[in-house]
Image (cartoon, rainbow, N blue to C red):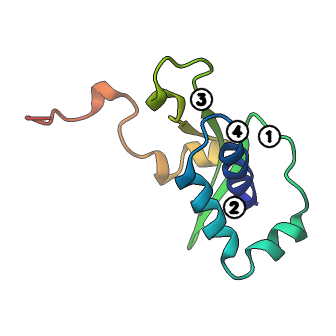
Amino acid sequence: RVAHLLLGRTRREAVGGVLDPGLRALLEEVLSYSGVKSQLAAVGPDPAPAPVAAISFRKDSLAADFFSTVTTLGTPQDVALQEMRIECFFPANQQTRESPFFSGPARWSDLPAQPGV
């Protein structure tokens, strides 16, 4: 499901906005991998992009459920900003919020000072 969402986003960005030969080449390469086209056909056509995507991670006995948002700048004045994407992951439930995925500092001010950075 996540691969389908990411390929759909890549496909839309490869044909819209600033035409990027590198992105188009990446899309063609991924689509040439064995089984990718058949997996996409099994899922069906790209749905309209949703404002959030549900993503689950599993490792051994750990499970974490997130929703993800991707932010783009609507009318950037710089080509670098036009291509920038900011993806944020948010816990989708209390179990994820309390999991080891969130055991680090909760605020930037809690991070240790790093000299020279």
SS class, disc 2:
helix
Disc 4 marks which amino acid? Gly
Q: Residues within 10 Å of mark 2 (few under 14, many from 20)?
A: few
Disc 3 marks which amino acid? Thr
Disc 2 marks which amino acid? Ala
Distance, label 3 to label 2, CA atoms, is 20 Å
Quarter of the rendering occupied by the N terminus: bottom right
Is label 2 or label 4 in front? 4
Residue 78, percent across and down?
46, 22
SS class, disc 3:
loop
Q: Is residue 38 left or right of residue 28?
A: right
Distance, label 3 to label 4, CA atoms, is 13 Å
Residue behind mark 4: 16
Residue behind mark 2: 3
Residue behind mark 3: 72
Residue 40, percent across and down?
82, 67
Is label 3 or label 2 in front? 3
- N-terminal label among 3 and 4: 4
Distance, label 2 to label 4, CA atoms, is 20 Å
Q: Nearer the viewer, residue 15 or 3?
A: 15
Distance, label 4 to label 1, CA atoms, is 14 Å
**Residue lying at 37% horizontally and 28% vertically, measured from the top left:** 107
In the image, residue 114 above or below residue 46: above
Residue 101, percent across and down?
48, 51
Q: Residue 57 — which label?
A: none
Distance, label 1 to label 3, CA atoms, is 13 Å
